[in-house]
Image: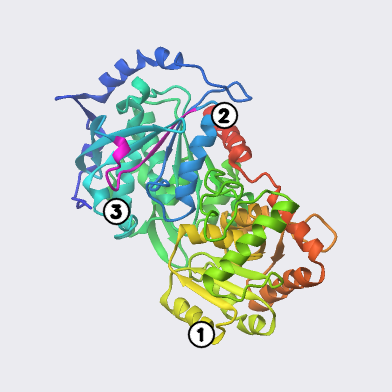
């Protein structure tokens, strides 16, 4: 990442922004005047269906990762799926992301501009492709190529520098990338910034645009995927962001536990027009002292603009009816009903047992864990339940990687119970699909889980989730009590005995009340877990943001 040299904040605040156009450099204000002249043409492009509210928005979604080009977790899935879902609702959508490698479908650069990033003039190039109705825009700069194998590597200030570049490039993309021949312009314009990496976008929009009579009607929405990651660094680092003095106070956090710091996410929350957590439960949790990770007061002070929306499933990627990974090796696709459960899903279960060298038994439940091996995911609660697994007729399969000590303990459990435990250390997308399809129960005892996708995938594939009642797990899984329409089991406190108790309820239901267990599974399969409803809720928040003052 390029160094952050000392700079004069006052000089930067008065310096006219420069944009490279061809071989000439002109003030951006002149270019924007020209752009505004084509805005009418932009509005009259081929008509699309319009949202139920009669609004057609120009939405720019910005994030540090986007599947399938780059992905480390749920953020990459949201960056891929949400734009497509908004397009289906009739909006024009651009997804802006770093170019960590050159992607063949992008061809050659379609535009470039010079940004002042933390006091350094920095040239970036834009690459564009159109997929599933979405304008995919890649920001090319050496700092992104250098971290292709670990996109969040480096210090917090290294990531902040890259995020500052991406945030500015995302804003400028509406003028510099001629998507379909016409830039987005500034009418009905909403920016959606994802997580702390680009939480500077709402701040820059206010400081460098609104205060200079630019993009006056554009609004910003900040999506909080995980509030524990905030972009903290020493307080004096705020002077390196290139912001006028009167904007720097928003970054200051005096945390009683960790001391004073510069906090990028805090400023983003304060400046964004709307803040969306990735589930209603998580929106509530981050406003509590326990779940706010030092930002509870910030969330509570912004309570009127904070809400929660549960993510959806991309059915093109996750659907047992046409999953490309459920072909061959004995695996089968299957329908979302009782017939599918008893035919294709049982075939997947037998194929999974054969693949792992487990006894091929249809009458024993397979308990699965899929995820990162760390404290947050509650892996220790599962490890502390080894006696439960040893004394019950179950098979247990793990897929994940993370802390070395937890990996070693899983391998030790496998060695002690070769007849019923398997641990796959690492990650395989194919095996994740096959394990989700073949397992009977998914264990998800996360200490906190902002939204969670694995429980959604599991329910869609007829695999019953056993989850800790937090965040999105609370919102998406209905606890089965023997009489209701539950879709899984939940426990209230992240303690091993509480986990074992509710896991025992699920296993006992499997053996003693099989029809009831299958009913729980089929109800999960038949839920609407896609992006349609989530996109509608995002749309409502974007429209609210558009008309906010």
Instruction: Determine crowd level at label 3: few under 14, some 14-19, many 20+ residues with C-alpha closer than 10 A.
Output: some
Say which residue label 2 marks.
Answer: 89
The residues bearing labels 1 and 2 have C-alpha atoms spaced at a distance of 52 Å
Q: Residue at x 27, y 20 (%)?
A: 31
Q: Is residue 433 above or below residue 352?
A: above
Which quadrant holds residue 235? bottom left
The residues bearing labels 2 and 3 have C-alpha atoms spaced at a distance of 33 Å
User: What secondary structure is marked by label 1?
Assistant: helix
| Percent coordinates x, y for residue 482 in the rendering | 83, 63
Q: Tell which residue pokes out farthest to the left in this image.
A: 23
Q: Residue at x 53, y 23 (%)?
A: 56
Foreground pick, 212 / 488: 488
The mark nearer the N terminus, 1 or 2, is 2
The mark nearer the N terminus, 3 or 1, is 3
Callout 1–callout 2 Cβ contact below 8 Å: no
Q: Which residues are magenta?
A: 92-106
User: What secondary structure is marked by label 2?
Assistant: loop
**In-image side of 7 versus 350 (left or right):** left
The residues bearing labels 3 and 1 have C-alpha atoms spaced at a distance of 36 Å
Say which residue label 3 marks.
Answer: 148
Q: Is residue 102 magenta?
A: yes
Q: Is residue 3 above or below residue 505?
A: above
Residue 258 bears which disc, if any?
none
Foreground pick, 65 / 155: 65
Which quadrant holds residue 105? top left
Say which residue label 1 marks.
Answer: 415
Q: Residue at x 36, y 38 (%)?
A: 204
| Percent coordinates x, y for residue 360 in the rendering | 63, 72
The mark nearer the N terminus, 2 or 3, is 2
Q: Is residue 198 above or below residue 293?
A: above
């Amino acid at each position: 990442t390029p160094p952050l040299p000392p700079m004069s904040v006052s000089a930067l605040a008065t310096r006219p922004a420069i944009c490279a156009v061809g071989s000439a450099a002109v003030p951006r204000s002149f270019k924007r005047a020209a752009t505004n002249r084509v805005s009418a043409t932009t509005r009259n492009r081929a008509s699309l269906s319009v949202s139920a509210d009669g609004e057609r928005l120009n939405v720019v979604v910005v994030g540090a990762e986007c599947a399938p080009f780059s992905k480390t977790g749920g953020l990459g899935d949201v960056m891929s799926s949400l734009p497509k879902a908004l397009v289906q609702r009739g909006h024009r959508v651009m997804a802006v992301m770093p170019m960590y490698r050159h992607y063949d479908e992008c061809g050659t650069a379609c535009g470039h501009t010079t940004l002042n990033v933390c006091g350094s003039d920095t040239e970036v190039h834009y690459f564009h492709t159109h997929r599933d109705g979405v304008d995919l825009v890649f920001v090319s700069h050496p700092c992104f190529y250098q971290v292709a194998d670990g996109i969040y590597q480096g210090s917090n200030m290294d990531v902040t520098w890259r995020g500052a570049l991406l945030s500015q490039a995302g804003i400028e993309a509406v003028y510099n990338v001629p998507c379909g021949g016409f830039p987005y312009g500034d009418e009905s314009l909403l920016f959606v910034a994802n997580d702390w990496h680009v939480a500077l976008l709402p701040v820059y929009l206010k400081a460098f645009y609104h205060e200079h009579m630019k993009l006056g009607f554009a609004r910003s929405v900040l999506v909080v995927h995980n509030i524990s990651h905030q972009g903290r660094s020493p307080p004096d680092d705020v002077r390196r962001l290139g912001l006028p003095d009167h904007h720097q106070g928003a970054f200051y956090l005096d945390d009683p536990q960790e001391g004073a710091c510069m906090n990028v996410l805090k400023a983003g929350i304060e400046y964004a027009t709307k803040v969306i957590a990735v589930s209603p439960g998580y929106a509530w949790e981050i406003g509590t002292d326990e779940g706010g990770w030092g930002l509870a007061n910030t969330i509570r002070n912004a309570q009127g603009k904070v809400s929660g929306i549960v993510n959806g499933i991309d059915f093109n990627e996750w659907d047992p009816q046409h999953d490309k990974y459920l072909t061959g090796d004995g695996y089968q696709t299957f329908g979302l009903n009782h017939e599918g459960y008893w035919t294709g899903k049982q075939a997947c279960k037998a194929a999974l047992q054969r693949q792992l060298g487990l006894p091929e038994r249809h009458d024993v439940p397979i308990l699965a864990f899929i995820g990162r091996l760390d404290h947050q995911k509650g892996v220790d609660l599962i490890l502390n339940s080894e006696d439960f697994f040893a004394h019950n007729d179950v098979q247990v399969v793990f897929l994940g990687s993370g802390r070395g000590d937890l990996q070693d303990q899983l391998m030790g459990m496998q060695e002690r119970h070769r007849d019923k435990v398997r641990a796959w250390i690492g990650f395989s997308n194919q095996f994740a699909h096959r394990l989700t399809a073949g397992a009977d129960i998914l264990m998800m005892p996360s200490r906190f889980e902002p939204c969670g996708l694995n429980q959604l995938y599991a329910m869609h594939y007829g695999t019953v989730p056993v989850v800790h009642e937090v965040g999105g797990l609370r919102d998406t899984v209905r606890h089965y009590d023997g009489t209701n329409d539950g879709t899984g089991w939940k426990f209230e406190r992240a303690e091993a005995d509480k986990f074992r108790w509710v896991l025992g309820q699920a296993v006992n239901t499997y053996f003693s009340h099989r029809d009831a267990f299958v009913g729980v599974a089929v109800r999960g399969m038949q839920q609407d877990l896609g992006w349609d409803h989530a996109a509608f809720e995002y749309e409502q928040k974007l429209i609210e943001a558009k008309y906010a003052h």
